[in-house]
Image (spheres, grey):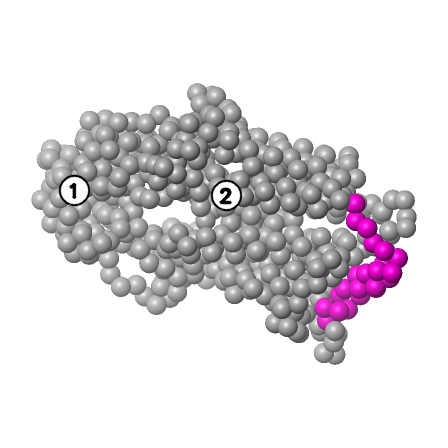
Amino acid sequence: MKEGFRQAMAWLHTWTGLIFGWLLFAIFLTGTLSYFKEEISHWTQPEVPVRALDAPASLALAQDYLQLHAPQAASWFIRLPDAREPGLSVSWREHGGGRRDFIDKTLDPATGAEIQARDTRGGEFFYRFHFQLEMPHPWGRWLATFAAFIMLVGLVTGIITHKKIFKEFFTFRPGKGQRSWLDGHNAIGVLVLPFHLMISYSSLVIFMAMVMPASIIASYGDDTRGFFNDLFGAPAEVRAAGVSAPLMPLPTLYAQVQAQSPGSRVGWIEVQTPGDQNARVRFSRHAGERIAHQRGGGWLFDGVNGTLQAQSSLEATPMLISGGMYGLHMGEFAGPWLRWLYFFFGLAGTAVIGTGLVMWLGKRQLKHAKRDAQPFELRLVEVLNIASMSGLVLGVAAFFWANRLLPVALAGRADWEIRWFFLLWALSLLHAMLRPGRRAWAEQLSLAAVLWAGLPLLNQLTTGQGLLQSIPAGDWAMAGFDLTALGSGLFLAWAAGKMWRTPVVSKRAAKPAKRACSTLIESEVG
């Protein structure tokens, strides 16, 4: 009975991993890229210069710009530059506008001049794709959340299946075919197991109200906004008095924030009814201030006389736990080194999924090695493996090449970058269907190596902000992207070299290899 249970867990681990593995690979890879969302956005908008950080000066420039260009707006929003996002962002909403009807501008934080940056979704595209899959709301979120649940199932069943899991962590036998893939799969899985458990479970907590709405519906019916207003606090409505009054200088209010909480980082500044006697100014805390994510909060001031109206209060324990899971998943609190650790752990998760897909196929292909053609179902899995892994890597590279090659003034430019991403991804599927499996892997990985390694040169030639300029200028977001792209290209070239070589299996080694592969599942549970 005991062995039967573990056999059942091995079966569940294997087949859920196969059916959802292609989707999970895309979710994990784009989610991993999202840990450097701001740096990617900076690379995709090279027109935004990097300046020395001076929050009060930038805040004064933003206020001057908004008073000149949007004096009658219903509200202003200002995001100060930081080490990851160098631009000074301002936006405003006119009276009568909807919740999303904003006019957005990017300013030079040193001069206040408006910057005409190229239209792109930058890192935001990968962040949104990670949990929305470019599908209409809410279907993409539902699918991504269900995939996260399957990932959690895969992790739990993997732990049950591998009874010697920690011993296997120290076992790696190179040059043993499927056995080497299994050793790598186990070792990487154990190394980052706590991280992957946290990521999978926290993603379910983030969308808890969507996937488990019964209690909300029972108490609030269709008024879900009422639930969230009660939970997080409804935003206070400020009505204009109709009496003009000068807005207090925002740097003065910023100084009050620093006096009350020295060293605090400010995320957004909202000004409601600017220029009116009832003006209110809210300074929100930066998301990276602490691990637990906090909705709202910060400091609320009277915009005319500068008196403090409200301040963040302590949160209830359930909200703190929920915000903690959200913060751990997003990693916004992480400094540079911890963010890189998040990034490499995310890549490790992607590798675990990829090696699992390769092992499933390789084990079954060996059974048909003497035949001229493999069964249709195995060929289908082979094609999907190639397109979902090397094809996705090609698609991401195409997105960045499109960012540099498309005309800056092209209408709908951001949408065209995304079309390039999906076009090359789709072409990789067609290519995998037309070419033999190993050759398709080699050709796609070779092309991916060229595209990724060529990104630093492309950046240098098209913007003049390549490594020769970004490193001396201390623009480590730009330089880090180029160096990471170069490293990715070198790794892909190494992988392509492996695929170009014809595998040589001696007759002496053939039988042990075949026996090891044919008993892969049995070895996992025995």
Q: Which SS class for mark 1? A: helix
Give the residue drawn at x 54%, y 43%. Answer: 487
**Image quarter of the N terminus:** bottom right
Labelled disc at residue 484 = 2
**Image quarter of the C terminus:** bottom right
Residue 247 figure quarter: top left
State the residue in front, 191 or 153: 191
The crowd level at tag 2 (other Cα within 10 Å; few <14, some 14-19, many 20+) is some
Residue 434: x %, y % from top left: 77, 34
Amino acid on which the number 1 mark rests in the picture: Pro
Residue 457 relative to residue 376: left or right: left
Residue 29: x %, y % from top left: 56, 48
> Mark 2 or mark 1, which is nearer to you?
2
Residue 338 relative to residue 449: left or right: left
* Residue interval drawn in magenta: 502-525
Mark 1 = which residue? 251
Give the residue drawn at x 43%, y 27%. Answer: 463
